[in-house]
Structure formats: structure tokens, C-alpha cells
Image: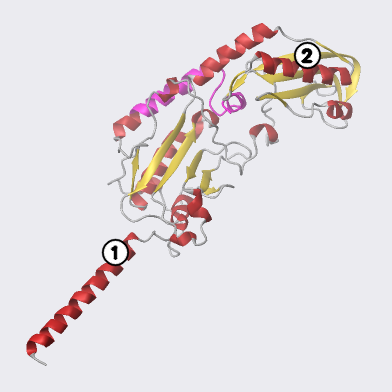
Amino acid sequence: MSSLTVALAILGGLTLAAVVGYNAWTSHRNAPRQPDARNTQPPESEGDAPQEDREPVLRVDPHQVAGAERHEPLFDPALPAPSAVPAPSAERRGGLDPLIDVIAPISLDGLASGDAAMAAMPATRRAGSKPVAVEGLNEHTGVWEPAVQGQRYSAFQVGVQLANRTGALNEIEYSEFVVKAQAFADAVNGALEFPEMLDEVARARELDQFASSHDAQLSFVLRARHAAWSPGYVQQNAARLGFVPGMIPGRMVLPAAELGLPPILGLSFDTQAALADDPAQSAIRQLSISLDVPQVDRAEKPFERMRNAASVLAHDMDGIVTDSDGQPLRGETMDAIGVDLEQLYDTLDARDLSAGSPLARRLFS
């Protein structure tokens, strides 16, 4: 074999090895990032994370709060609805309030038992898309409350919510409320007095107009710069910031400190990736972090926590925070949105519908 043949053979082998090595490197580089079993502890301080490539960006029109578009609530299914959860403190939560409810009083000749009231409750507690509630005036405590077995009540009141994110109470829904309320009053031998329908429907429209122009649901989009992420990698990094799995695959939440309240933030990624036969091989290239502004008390500083969470995740996961079109936004834009949110909070406070309050959670749901 000539030296030329040997040289060509060696050259061919080296070329083949280079191709194989390059393909292996490319495959490894593009493989979804996996969770690190050695690094599961949260950082000592989120504020100490490096600042480079951490410019947070918001996927929302800074003037979104002035729009009339309705949005779906972002409650996590893992958490019960606020109205269905007993309050862990003495503060009354979610009772009928003339600010956002039509209230029809029922007078009684004597006392009615809680058992009789519960048996007379309407089969469905809604009039169209609006919640209906019944409360009794407890004989001993003098407090309005949902009927309880073994208690006795000197009066009742039936209410229907004036507005929610589906819109304002209309005439058809009001008529359905009247039928349900009258049936309950008849069952407990009470005399029912209804407010004027046209007045209440007009009040519902005014409240709905206010709510729709002061609603805000914010969302960041975090996109991978280079390698994609596996579901486990996303979950591990989010868990370091306090996020926990939700009931829906691909959904995580930052829970509130008080049981039963809506989560402070939500984090979601592709559900199909989370449901794959081998999730470790699923490639996630983006996720979203969301905040339902009226549902969370401003004292929780939810926007600051949202901004910080996106910043830390972008740094740790080699990602970039963008708008819905993939365009990075600068920190000054985020600052301006923060100012807008403070103004929104002040407006809600002035209307006695403070963000995170029971009334706000009901109205913006």
C-alpha cells in the first residue's frame, strides 16, 4: 500500500471522526436541559443573582387596564374558589354586599331553622352566569351567614351578583333570580321584597363598565436563548422560587400565604410536553408567568415578585423575557407599567374594591 493511500485513509478516518463528533456535540447542545440532581436547594437570596442578561419584559399593553376586553380568571384548579373556603380568621369573607350585589330581604313571622333553610335552597346557585347566595340572620349572634344546621334565623336575604368577568347582570338573569328567590321565600314562609329591576340592571351596567376598564391580567413570556428545557428542568428552577405544581399538567403556582386565597403568580408551559411518555425528552422553548392583578393584595407586592421571578429564571435558565411577539422590552417600560399598576390599585381602593379583597375577587372572576 502506497504512502498516498495510507494518507488518504487516515484523512478519511479523521474526517469521519470529526463529522461524528460534530453531530454528537450538536445533538448534546440541542437536547432539552435536564434538572440537576446535585442542585436542588433555593439560592440564599434572589436579589443576589447576577444582573447581566436579566432585563425583565412584560407581555402586556401598558394601557391594558383601560381596555374593555374581558379575560378569563387565572385561578389555579388546585386551590378552592374563595367563596367555598372557610376563612381561617375571624374576618368575614365573601358575604353579600350592596356594593356588588342585588339584595332581596325576606322577613319572617317567627324563626326558621337552618335545616329548613338548607332544604329550601335552589338546586343551582346561579342566575345565568351570576352567583346567587342566601344568608340568614343568626338568632344568637346577630350575624348574617350561610344557613347552618342546628341554628335558627330571624330573617333571610337572597342576593345575586351585579357583574363579573362575563359581563353585567341583565334582565333575563334578574328574572331567573326572582324565580329562585321567590321559591326559597315560599319554602320558609317568608315575605320577599325585590328591588326595582330596571334600577338594578342599570347599576349592574355601571359597575361592569368600571370593572372592565380597571381589570388587568399581566403575563411575561420567557423564551430559551439556545438549548430547550425539559419539564423537569423548568419545574426545578421554578421550585427554587417557591412555585409548586398545580392540578393541570404544565401549570405551577406561587401560592398565597393564606389557605384558600388565589395564587400570587402562575407559571405555565406546554401541557403536551408535561404529558409526554418521556417528559425528559420533551423540548420546551418558552413558558409564561402570569399575574391576575385584582385577585392579589397589593401588600404582597405581586408585580415586584413577578418581575424578580422572571429575571432570575431568565438568568438561571439562559432565557430572555419578551412580549408576545418575541420582542425584548427594556426595564424602563417595566417601570412605567409598575407606575400604572399603582394608579390602578389606588383607584380600586377608592372604590372599596381593593385588589385581593373578597369583593374584588368576586367581581373580577
Mark 2 nearby-residue class (10 Å; few <14, some 14–19, many ≥20)? many
| Rendering quarter of residue 281 | bottom left
Question: Under tag 1, what secondary structure?
Answer: helix
**Whether residue 339 is situated above or below residue 74 in the rendered picture:** above
Q: Could one spot residue 351 in this view of the protein?
A: no
Provide the major secondary structure of the magenta segment: helix
**Residue 26: numbered disc:** 1
Range of residues picked out in magenta: 336-365
Query: Residue placed at 71% from the left, 23% from the top?
Result: 132
In the rendered image, which residue does mark 2 sit on?
105
Name, please, the residue furthest toward the bottom: 1
Query: Residue placed at 53% from the left, 55% from the top?
Result: 275
Give the left or right position of residue 278, taking residue 84 as reference: left
**Percent from the top left, x then y, of residue 211?**
53, 19
Q: Could one spot residue 36 in this view of the protein?
A: yes
**Percent from the top left, x then y, of residue 285?**
38, 50
Query: Residue placed at 43% from the left, 39% from the top?
Result: 306
Task: Pick the residue in front: 175 or 204.
Answer: 175
Specify whether residue 353 is painted magenta: yes
| Rendering quarter of residue 176 | top right
Q: In the rendered view of the protein, which quadrant contains the C terminus?
A: top right
Q: In the rendered view of the protein, which quadrant contains the N terminus?
A: bottom left
- Which of disc 1 and disc 2 is earlier in sequence? 1
Task: Pick the residue in front: 133 or 176.
Answer: 176
Give the left or right position of residue 329, taking residue 357 as reference: left
Specify whether residue 260 is painted magenta: no
